[in-house]
Image: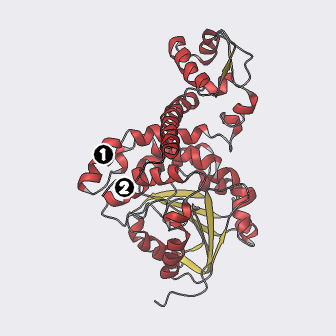
Amino acid sequence: MDNPEIDSAKSDAFADRMVDMLNYGALALMTSIGHRSGLFDTMKDMKPSTSDDIAKAAGLDERYVREWLGAMVTGGIIECDPEGLQYVLPREHSKWLTRKASPNNIAVFAQYISELGSVEDHILSCFKHGGGVPYSKYRRFHEIMAEDSGQTVVAALMDSILPLVPELMDQLKKGIDVLDVGCGSGKALNVMAKHFSNSRFIGYDLSSEALHTARMEAKKEKLLNVCYEEKDLSDFDVPGRFDFITAFDAIHDQARPERVLAGIFKSLKTGGVFLMQDIAASSQVYKNIGHPVGPLLYTISCMHCMSVSLEQNGAGLGAMWGEEKAREMLSEAGFSDIRMKQLPHDFQNYFYIMKKVAEQTV
């Protein structure tokens, strides 16, 4: 049987996309370096300057700065004069690349590319032999996640996220018991503890490194109403203890998410509320075609979220478990009143709000 004729235009267009992929992948690495080195922050308010002036202002080696500038100029991120002797970061670009641009600093997310690339060999081994990669192999993931959530979840917590729950702000002011499941570095919990001194806050997480960061920040802020516990979330049992439980981007990478959700339901007081933030996506891959950051989220899922769960012989849900699967599992855990909301400015996250109306009977 003859092979069908190739559509040359389609083939050429795909080849062009692949070349773009290589360039954008390289730019992601250089953008991460620009963020971590402070080069974007340094250049934000500088007039057109030489590589030597930029390097001195940033306290960096000129030769490396000059080559980095080459990538930034040819990638259309930084502009230079015709002779290439002076460089400038346009204001229209800096509003998406500097720490002062938070929560719109896209350079923060570029760090995931190099971090995930560092475990490529381990992930490839999993492709061949199964299993997963342990948290210990990821050198900076918790650090990046803390910065990520700091400008997405934490930045919107007081003004946009907590007000999604009716009457919650008044309850927090009066004083209630709050648990953050998978609290990580404690960014969200410490903000809540600082704003609501009459409430009591506890954070559970499996990472001792992340919890150390959380405790140090709480100590620095002199927060006496928050504490952190290193705990395997697959088996925690504190029946009817909490008025409000949160899980920010934490359920999908648990080894046994069904047990975690069941534990959350059991740990809520009747009338208590569970607020779960997770990735805005469908459980069906074809419905995620056209998702603004679909390839990035599936990559993070494959190379971290799914893998750390599978390493513990877990479910391996992955970050893209989706709304349909989330609703199914929340219902199985005992929640019957499940509402999902999305913030107008946030295309990446869903916020599930559930009130415990009765004890679980299934």
Tag 1, which secondary structure? helix
Let me know if residue 24 appears in the view. Answer: yes
Q: Amino acid at mark 2?
A: Ser
- Which residue is located at x 58 percent, y 46 percent? 148
Query: Going by the image, does 298 lie left or right of 109?
Result: left
> Crowding at label 2, few (<14), some or many (≥20) Cα neighbours within 10 Å?
many
* Residue 25 sits above or below residue 2 on the image: above
First along the sequence among labels 1 and 2? 1
- Which residue is located at x 72 percent, y 19 percent? 46
Q: Quadrant of the N terminus?
A: bottom left
Tag 2, which secondary structure? helix
Query: Going by the image, does 283 lie left or right of 121?
Result: right
Q: Nearer the viewer, residue 18 or 45?
A: 18
Query: Going by the image, does 33 lie left or right of 119?
Result: right
Q: Which residue is mark 1?
A: 122
* Residue 27 sits above or below residue 312 on the image: above
* Residue 152 sits above or below residue 161 on the image: above
Q: Nearer the viewer, residue 243 or 142?
A: 142
User: Residue lying furthest front in this view?
Assistant: 2
- Which residue is located at x 66 percent, y 33 percent? 98
Q: Quadrant of residue 258?
A: bottom left
Residue 168 rendering spot, x and y as whole percentages: 71, 69
Residue 151 rendering spot, x and y as whole percentages: 64, 46
Q: Which residue is mark 2?
A: 307
- Which residue is located at x 61 percent, y 54 percent? 188
Q: Quadrant of residue 147?
A: top right
Total residue callouts? 2
Residue 121 rendering spot, x and y as whole percentages: 30, 42
Q: Amino acid at mark 1?
A: His
Q: Gap in Å between the C-alphas at discs 1 and 2?
A: 10 Å
* Residue 215 sits above or below residue 179 on the image: above
